[in-house]
Image (tube, rainbow, N blue to C red):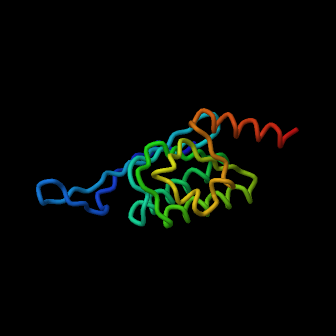
Amino acid sequence: MPEYCAARSSVSPQWPDAFGGYQVPEFELSSEQRDDAAVIRLIGDLDIVTSRQLDETLAASRRTLDRVVLDLSAVDFMDTSSLAVIVSHWKGLVASGGMLALAGARFQYTRTLWITGLADRIPMYDSVDLAIAGQRAAAADGAG
């Protein structure tokens, strides 16, 4: 079982605030095991700065589990560097008989999934619970 992981990025793009200074958007990442799946929750911006943390967490989860759910319900931005990380791990999991699903992706913040056509290829669900149930059903169908 992958151990619980929580990270907060201290290096991220800076945005001007109302007082002429800059604020750094926070990024949080956590991982837990639920029903033989790694559930990775992401909060904030998925970009070139934070995609390395995502890559490392996905790699660690894949060492012990072959089912992964990415909870994107609190993602505020997704660029192509993070999308490349997701695609790489999705392909690796599928090639080894595993599964990767996305949960809670909101179009306005994760539109790169739709622009690239990946929203039609990577299994997507409205919630983590539905993603886990979908993976469980797919695994049962594959076994029988």
Position above or below: 54 against 141 = below
> What number of labels is visible?
0
Image-based side of 137 in relation to 32, left or right: right
Q: Quadrant of the N terminus?
A: top right
Quadrant of the rendered image containing residue 30: top left
x 46%, y 63%: residue? 79
**Residue at the farthest left position:** 19
Quadrant of the rendered image containing residue 95: bottom right
Position above or below: 104 against 91 = above
x and y percentages locating residue 43 in the rendered image: 41, 46
| Nearer to the camera, 94 or 22 | 22
| Nearer to the camera, 106 or 138 | 106
Image-based side of 55 in relation to 25, left or right: right
x 53%, y 41%: residue? 104
x 15%, y 53%: residue? 18
| Nearer to the camera, 30 or 26 | 26
x and y percentages locating residue 75 in the rendered image: 44, 49
x and y percentages locating residue 87 in the rendered image: 61, 61
x 42%, y 55%: residue? 77
| Nearer to the camera, 91 or 5 | 91
Image-based side of 96 in relation to 53, left or right: right
Image-based side of 108 in relation to 133, left or right: left
Q: Quadrant of the C terminus?
A: top right
